Image (cartoon, grey):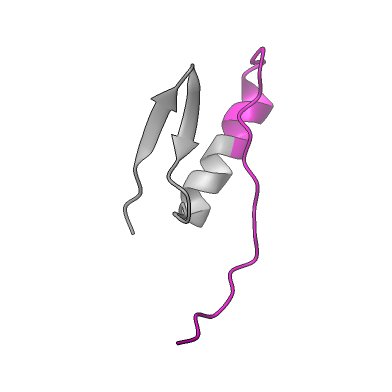
Amino acid sequence: MVSDLTLESGRLVLAAGETISDLLFLRLQNINAMARLKEPIMVRRFASRPRTN
């Protein structure tokens, strides 16, 4: 799945309800660990729930 990341007020924002891949999640975590950013990249991980119709 491809998601749109937008830059708003200097922050990367993911559209509501969108998800990122595990690989991108891990890369963002690695950037936080390696780069000493003034404001760390905020990434929250939610357990995926099966969709029901």
The outermost residue toward the bottom is 53
Coordinates of residue 42 in the picture (x, y in percent): 63, 34
Picture residue at 41% right of the left edge, 25% below the top: 7
The outermost residue toward the top is 38
In the displayed structure, 7 sits above or below 29; it is above
Image quarter of the N terminus: bottom left
In the displayed structure, 3 sits above or below 40; it is below
Coordinates of residue 38 in the picture (x, y in percent): 67, 12
In the picture, measured across the screen, residue 25 lies left or right of residue 6, that is: right
How many marks do you count on the picture?
0
| Magenta part of the chain | 29-53
In the picture, measured across the screen, residue 4 lies left or right of residue 51, that is: left
Image quarter of the C terminus: bottom left
Picture residue at 50% right of the left edge, 85% below the top: 52
Coordinates of residue 19 in the picture (x, y in percent): 47, 55
Q: Is residue 44 magenta?
A: yes
In the displayed structure, 18 sits above or below 32; it is below
Coordinates of residue 27 in the picture (x, y in percent): 53, 39
Q: Nearer the viewer, residue 2 or 33?
A: 2
Q: Quadrant of residue 47?
A: bottom right
Q: Is residue 32 magenta?
A: yes
Picture residue at 58% right of the left edge, 29% below the top: 31
Q: Nearer the viewer, residue 34 or 44?
A: 44
Q: Quadrant of residue 36?
A: top right
Q: Main secondary structure of the magenta part?
A: loop
